[in-house]
């Protein structure tokens, strides 16, 4: 499993998710801590938003959102709204949250456990 959010959500029955508990944790969510799929997404977002590559990402107001989140993360060291992350073998896999703010080091975040989920 590479960690795409739909793969994570769809491969577990609802009964499995009912046993997941969530806690707020402080986690390092730098690029090398992300899952393989999340790193691929970040690379594609960078190419779209910074290099201008037309790859299906970066439409609508993505660049403005990216820049806003970048300012917040660099000033505070924390996300505006904590993303929901699921730790898997290859790293942290975002289930919810803005992809453009996944590469920073985070502050306090909710993380799920039982079958270990992370949510900041």
Image: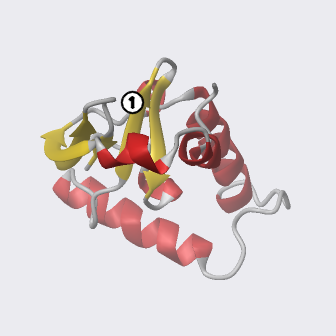
Structure colour scheme: secondary structure
How many numbered marks have been drawn onto this rendered protein structure? Answer: 1
In the structure shown, which secondary structural element does the residue marked by tag 1 occupy?
strand
Above or below — where is 89 with respect to 13? above
Above or below — where is 93 with respect to 90? below
Badge 1 is on which residue?
Answer: 87
Q: Position of residue 39 (x, y in %)?
A: 59, 35
Residue in view at x 61 percent, y 46 percent: 10
Quarter of the figure with residue 114:
top left
> Quick one: quadrant of the N terminus?
top right
Is residue 92 found left or right of 71 in the rendered image? right
Name the outermost residue toward the right. 54
Residue in view at x 45 percent, y 58 percent: 96
Instruction: Determine crowd level at label 1: few under 14, some 14-19, many 20+ residues with C-alpha closer than 10 A.
Output: many
Name the outermost residue toward the bottom. 60
Name the outermost residue toward the front. 15
Q: Position of residue 51 (x, y in %)?
A: 73, 54
Above or below — where is 73 with respect to 30? below
């Amino acid at each position: 499993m590479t960690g795409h959010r739909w793969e994570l959500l769809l491969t577990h029955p609802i009964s499995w998710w009912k046993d997941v508990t969530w806690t707020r944790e402080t986690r390092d969510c730098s690029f090398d801590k992300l899952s393989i799929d999340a790193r691929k997404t970040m690379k594609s977002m960078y190419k779209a938003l910074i290099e201008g590559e037309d790859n299906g990402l970066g439409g609508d107001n993505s660049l403005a959102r990216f820049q806003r989140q970048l300012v917040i993360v660099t000033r505070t060291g924390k996300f505006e709204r904590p993303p929901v992350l699921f730790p898997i073998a290859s790293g942290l896999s975002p289930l919810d949250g803005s992809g453009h703010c996944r590469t920073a080091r985070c502050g306090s975040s909710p993380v799920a456990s039982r079958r270990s989920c992370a949510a900041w």
